[in-house]
């Protein structure tokens, strides 16, 4: 028995009006923008930046002290974050003066021993240059995506809807990063870029079937929903397994180490795919049904 069959799809179309399928994603998008705006006002950026983009120092300590006690111990320094790193602790500090840096190192050596400390630094200038490159990567990806979409469909409303859906996926995923305290690192940036591909894939599947195939448009929408929702569901299942393995397994198996970067990538992709399901099968579907299908039906009757 199919998990996603005609009965479930028909029940979905009966439950939500055409107006609701368009408005609900737009409301979620607006709330996501408000979250990003609030974060920008509080910290000066739409998302908390990791050391790769901010610059500073990353120090790994071989200690069993809790995260709370370490936050208290280093409260006099510009501590950015404290995370578990296997059986050790990873402390990230924002850029400091040379004097503050020396004082911090001396404090750590005195309290934990030089043999238990590993340290690396990222220059503030280098971090800012990475911010520019990250922004350029997102912009270039969107420009290329927009170009491909316009070349394929050559219709304004479907093309804009596909592009907006991909943008909304990233906005929602970034907002959820703020809600759950994730930072922008190379790993989470890669996850955001991957969301563009997922968004284009599902939206092209839907839009291409409706615009390029002859016959009943609603039948094409239902067929695309079956395929697309199954694709996204299997991907979500794999990501949930990845999240569990990278987060929980080390609690039960001592040889396992929690891999924070894998966990963060999985979380960003999970939220992004949930947003993509909403933006594709509610917003894009609603836009096609309201603005495109009537035009197509009129043309086919006249021909």
Image (cartoon, rainbow, N blue to C red):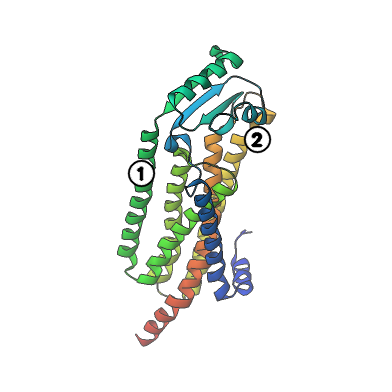
x and y percentages locating residue 234 in the rendered image: 55, 50
- Please, what secondary structure does the residue beneath circle 1 have? helix
Position of residue 99 in the picture relative to residue 236 (left or right): left
x and y percentages locating residue 96 in the rendered image: 46, 29
State the quadrant of the N terminus. bottom right
State the quadrant of the C terminus. bottom left
Real-space Cα distance between discs 1 and 2? 35 Å
**Foreground label between 1 and 2:** 1
Task: Please name whichever residue, 171 or 101, is drawn nearer the observer in this view of the structure.
Answer: 101
x and y percentages locating residue 8 in the rendered image: 62, 66
Q: Quadrant of residue 134?
A: top left
* Residue at figure coordinates x 56%, y 62% from the top left: 28
Quick one: label 1 or label 2, which is nearer the N terminus?
1
* Residue at figure coordinates x 44%, y 57% from the top left: 167
x and y percentages locating residue 122 in the rendered image: 41, 29
Q: Which residue is mark 2?
A: 248
**Residue 132 tag number:** 1
Query: Can residue 223 be seen?
Result: yes
- Please, what secondary structure does the residue beneath circle 2 have? loop
Most extreme residue toward the right is 252
Query: Can residue 231 be seen?
Result: no
| Mark 1 in CB contact with mark 2 (< 8 angstroms) | no
Residue 291 drawn above or below residue 261: below
């Amino acid at each position: 028995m199919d998990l996603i069959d005609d009965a479930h799809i028909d029940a979905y179309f009966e439950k939500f009006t055409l107006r609701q399928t368009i408005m609900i994603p737009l409301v979620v998008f607006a709330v996501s923008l408000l979250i990003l705006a609030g974060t920008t006002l509080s910290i000066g950026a739409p998302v908390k930046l990791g050391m790769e983009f901010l610059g500073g120092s990353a120090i790994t300590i071989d200690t069993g002290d809790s995260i709370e006690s370490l936050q208290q111990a280093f409260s006099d320094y510009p501590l950015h974050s404290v995370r578990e790193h296997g059986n050790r602790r990873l402390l990230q500090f924002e850029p400091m003066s040379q004097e503050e840096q020396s004082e911090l190192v001396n404090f750590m050596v005195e309290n934990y021993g030089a043999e238990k400390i590993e340290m690396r630094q990222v220059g503030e200038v280098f971090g800012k240059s990475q911010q520019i490159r990250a922004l350029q990567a997102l912009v270039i990806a969107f420009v290329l995506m927009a170009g491909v979409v316009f070349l394929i469909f050559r219709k304004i409303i479907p093309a804009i809807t596909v592009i907006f859906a991909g943008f909304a996926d990233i906005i929602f995923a970034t907002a959820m990063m703020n809600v759950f305290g994730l930072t922008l690192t190379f790993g989470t940036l890669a996850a955001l870029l991957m969301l563009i591909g997922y968004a284009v894939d599902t939206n092209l599947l839907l839009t291409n079937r409706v615009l390029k195939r002859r016959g009943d448009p609603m039948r094409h929408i239902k067929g695309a929903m079956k395929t697309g929702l199954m694709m996204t569901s299997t991907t979500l299942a794999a990501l949930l397994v990845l999240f569990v393995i990278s987060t929980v397994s080390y609690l039960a198996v001592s040889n396992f180490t929690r891999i924070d970067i894998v966990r963060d990538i999985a979380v960003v992709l999970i939220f992004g795919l949930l947003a993509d399901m909403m933006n594709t099968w509610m917003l894009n579907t609603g836009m096609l049904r309201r603005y495109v299908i009537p035009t197509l039906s009129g043309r086919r009757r006249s021909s």
